[in-house]
């Protein structure tokens, strides 16, 4: 599945700091145009530093400058740290996959890949097929379809919990 997440999807769910945007851009989860749209959003909110203005004005031909500008913007003092950035991107990637799960051959296999990419976070384990069940559920007493539906429900529950914590303050 394409790892790029559209800016419109991200904007609806959370607010990215510059360091989070830089991480997403360098990991190829946020495209150059998403970074430009983020800068445009920040300009409309009143953030008018020269780097933000420069990023907001980039064209596709200048896309090669996005990473450097994001890195400079990320170097400014902020309150987020690498672990919170990773956790937010984990949520965004899983939310994007969940919303588009019908477009992939095996969405739960994609979940397993993301789970590994993020160093096996404990709160994702309940919807990873190969992880042992810890809540008393007995997969052998259910059909494969029921077991898959349970994993999808656990995934949805995770996303709902995370969505509440990442919701933008302007909601």
Image (tube, rainbow, N blue to C red):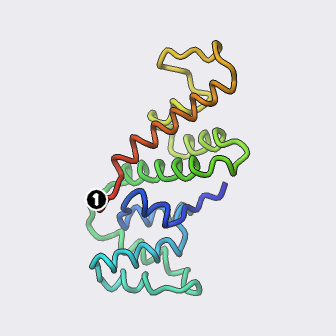
Eyeballing the image, is 74 above or below 135? below
Residue furthest out toward the front: 171
Residue 72 screen position, x and y as percent: 37, 75
| Disc 1, SS | loop
Eyeballing the image, is 166 above or below 129? below
Residue 9 screen position, x and y as percent: 49, 61
In front here: 41 or 115? 41
Q: Residue at x 69, y 24 (%)?
A: 144
Q: Mark 1, residues whose alpha carbon is within 10 Å: few (<14), some, or many (≥20)?
A: few
Q: Residue at x 43, y 51 (%)?
A: 86
In front here: 146 or 23? 146
Q: Residue at x 67, y 47 (%)?
A: 102
Residue 110 screen position, x and y as percent: 64, 44
Residue 75 screen position, x and y as percent: 33, 69
Counting labels gives 1
Q: Quadrant of the N terminus?
A: bottom right
Q: Quadrant of the C terminus?
A: bottom left
In the rendered image, which residue does mark 1 sit on?
169
Q: Residue at x 57, y 28 (%)?
A: 150
The picture quadrant where one finds residue 47 is bottom left
The picture quadrant where one finds residue 21 is bottom left
Residue 112 lies left or right of residue 71; in this view the side is right
């Amino acid at each position: 599945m394409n790892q790029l997440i559209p800016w419109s999807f991200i904007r609806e769910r959370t607010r990215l700091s510059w360091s989070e945007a830089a991480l997403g851009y360098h990991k190829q989860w946020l495209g150059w145009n998403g970074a430009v749209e983020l800068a445009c959003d920040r300009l409309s909110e009143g953030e008018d530093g020269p780097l933000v203005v420069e990023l907001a004005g980039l064209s596709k031909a200048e896309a090669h400058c996005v990473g450097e500008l994001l890195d400079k913007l990320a170097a400014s003092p902020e309150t987020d740290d690498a672990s919170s950035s990773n956790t937010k991107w984990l949520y965004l990637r899983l939310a994007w996959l969940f919303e588009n799960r019908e477009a992939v051959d095996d969405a739960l296999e994609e979940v397993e890949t993301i789970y590994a990419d993020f160093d096996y976070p404990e709160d994702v384990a309940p919807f990873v097929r190969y992880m042992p069940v810890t809540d008393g559920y007995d997969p052998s007493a259910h059909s494969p379809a029921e077991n898959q539906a349970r994993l999808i429900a656990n995934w949805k529950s995770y996303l709902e919990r995370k969505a509440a914590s990442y919701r933008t303050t302007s909601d």
